[in-house]
Amino acid sequence: MDEATLEYYEKNAAVIAPGYEAASAGVSALFPFVFKPGQRVLDIGAGSGRDMARLLSLGIDAYGIEPSGSMRPIRAP
């Protein structure tokens, strides 16, 4: 991630993260058709962790990497 983008997320995470969390469905609606329980998935640019939480709820072994410390979720999976 370039410095300008990282700086944007660091400064605006408090506004951006709730929007990510509030978004419904999207690509995550396809997770049950694409991934099987027990498979491993790496979410690069995991943002608020919304998609990782969905993957974990489906029994998928999900891991995430998020360069912006302000965007990383506080909750534990």
Image (spheres, rainbow, N blue to C red):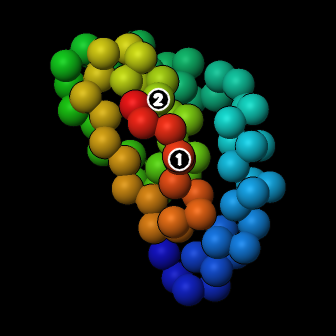
| Total labels drawn | 2
Coordinates of residue 43 in the picture (x, y in percent): 38, 46
Q: Is residue 60 left or right of residue 38?
A: right
Look at mark 2 in the image and give the residue it sits on: 53
**Above or below 1: residue 36:** above
Q: Secondary structure at mark 2?
A: helix
Coordinates of residue 66 in the picture (x, y in percent): 45, 59
Coordinates of residue 42 in the picture (x, y in percent): 30, 44
Q: Secondary structure at mark 1?
A: loop
Q: Is residue 62 left or right of residue 57?
A: left
- Image quadrant where one finds the C terminus: top left
Q: Residue at x 25, y 14 (%)?
A: 37
Which label sits on residue 46?
A: none
Q: Is residue 64 visible?
A: yes
Coordinates of residue 8 in the picture (x, y in percent): 70, 75
Q: Residue at x 48, y 75 (%)?
A: 1
Counting residues from the start of the chain, the first of labels 1 and 2 encountered is 2
In this view, the residue in front, 71 or 55, is: 71
Q: Residue at x 53, y 26 (%)?
A: 28
Q: Which corner quadrant of the image does residue 6 belong to?
A: bottom right
Q: Are marks 1 and 2 in contact (CB under 8 Å)?
A: yes
Q: Is residue 5 visible?
A: no
Look at mark 1 in the image and give the residue it sits on: 73
In this view, the residue in front, 35 or 16, is: 16
